[in-house]
Amino acid sequence: MIPKELLNSIKNREESYHDGFNATEASNFAKLHGNITVSSDDGHSASENSGISDGRGDTNTDTDDEEPDIDLDPRYLNSKYECLRPTPLIPPYNKKLVSLLETIERARELSLESKNALSYRHAIAAIKSYPREIQSSREAAKIKGIGTKIAGSIKTFLETGTIPEADAIREDERYQTLEIFNGIFGVGPVTAKAWYNKGYRTIDDILENEPDLSVAQRLGIELYKDFSQRMSRADVEEILNIVTMEVKAIDPRCELTPVGGYRRGKTSNGDLDVVISHPDEESAKELLRKIVHRLEKKGHLKHQLWYGEPSQYDEAKRDILVGNDEHKNVMDKLDKCFCAFLQPSTGIHRQLDIIVAPWSQYGTAVLGWSGSRQFERAMKDFAKKEHSRHFASHGLFTNTIPRQRIPVRDERHCFELMGLKWIDPEFRNC
């Protein structure tokens, strides 16, 4: 039996794409597209159909000759770099298509087909930012990031209103079980698949039969019911207000920025990520310990699921979160604590990730932890290939040996140094 919470989360993910933009969001999206030059910054024109590695730009589809050959919308920036164009959280166009493709991408990710999953993420990001409904698969095939197979799926969708593979995945017991296992803190696709292959189908199966659970995984299982309950923005803000008050009580000069999905405009959040800094870098060195101690003393922080400072990283700690995409930045060189925070108004444990950055790294930390994962990946790729820069949450560097740190004033300055136009966080939802 699949837990009701998981089935509801899958259903909510699909239905969220039918909510659409409100008038203001749609207007902002249109304005952003209108302000972008058609010639892409990677040296290719928007109408160019040259291929991209991994088959993402393959335009030789098996589509019908009778299907209309429609040019790309001239407002669309046809680039392989998703960080060059605005991508809304909920696309104003092609919503159901995006939802179906996301299901397939997620299934590939859970099956450890990383390269294939990445191809889907490129296509999804492109479609989410496309400024009109896609009218034919031949039109779609001209978009960089959409290869032969995905263009074929788009053709099927345009003809039938669905993609059978995505429908089948949503009903598949294996997919649903892997989603449950992967939702446990400290568990990624590798461990989830290994457990499934051992015959485990429920969390109780894991507890009864798995002898090698890490401390983080045992805590993750204990907190699974609480952590699987999504937070509204009001829930996030309740916790954020408490954290802000307690951090300012330690030192009023501390600065805090909520990041992650909340900063990108999500109305439903699985956790809260907060980047904290202090103008005096010496004062920041012990800041994480002081924050964690104070939150524990006040009764807010109930469990430390993972605690790390750069000097304390070792292989054992690296293994805890291997493959867990929600913590892709776990091995950056910033102090951090992932913890269970007891929300006063609900009595529910919420996942709170506290990241402390030196003042000189505050801007890059905020940028790196804001996401999305695909936006950050594209940004790193663009910085490296187009401007010989290396970006990480703990700084911007020359792409040389040895690397040299490039001073960064703030997040906007980091965009400039990488040769990128500023994009507001709510439009970084690749």
Image (cartoon, rainbow, N blue to C red):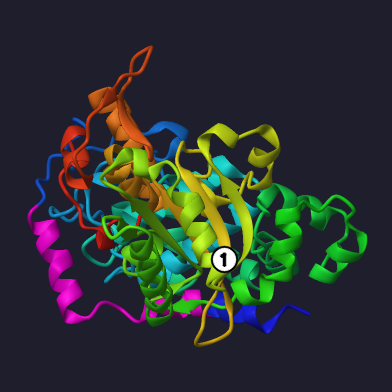
User: Is 202 on the left or on the right of 247, as rendered?
Assistant: right
Magenta-drawn stretch contains 26: yes
The magenta span reads 12-35
Q: Which residue shows up at 56% across the image and 68% down it? A: 297
User: Is 231 on the left or on the right of 229, as rendered?
Assistant: left
What is the secondary structure assignment of the residue under circle 1? helix
Q: Which residue shows up at 66% across the image and 64% down it? A: 179
Q: Is 122 in front, or is 269?
A: 269
- With respect to residue 394, does 365 lie above or below? below
User: Can residue 352 be seen from the camera position used here?
Assistant: yes
x then y, percent, for residue 378: 34, 41
Give the dominant element type of the magenta stretch: helix, strand or loop: helix
Quadrant into which the C terminus falls = bottom left
Which residue appears farthest toward the top when viewing the image?
Answer: 401
Quadrant into which the N terminus falls = bottom right
- With respect to residue 80, does 208 lie above or below? below
x then y, percent, for residue 320: 68, 46
Q: Which residue shows up at 57% across the image and 73% down it? A: 299
**Which quarter of the figure has residue 206?**
bottom right
Magenta-drawn stretch contains 62: no
x then y, percent, for residue 418: 22, 34
**Which quarter of the figure has residue 398?**
top left
Dot 1 alpha-carbon crowd within 10 angstroms: few under 14, some 14 to 19, many 20 or more: some
Q: Which residue shows up at 17% across the image and 40% down it? A: 413
Q: Is 203 in front, or is 18?
A: 203
x then y, percent, for residue 239: 43, 74
- With respect to residue 47, does 294 lie above or below? below
Which residue is the site of mark 1? 296
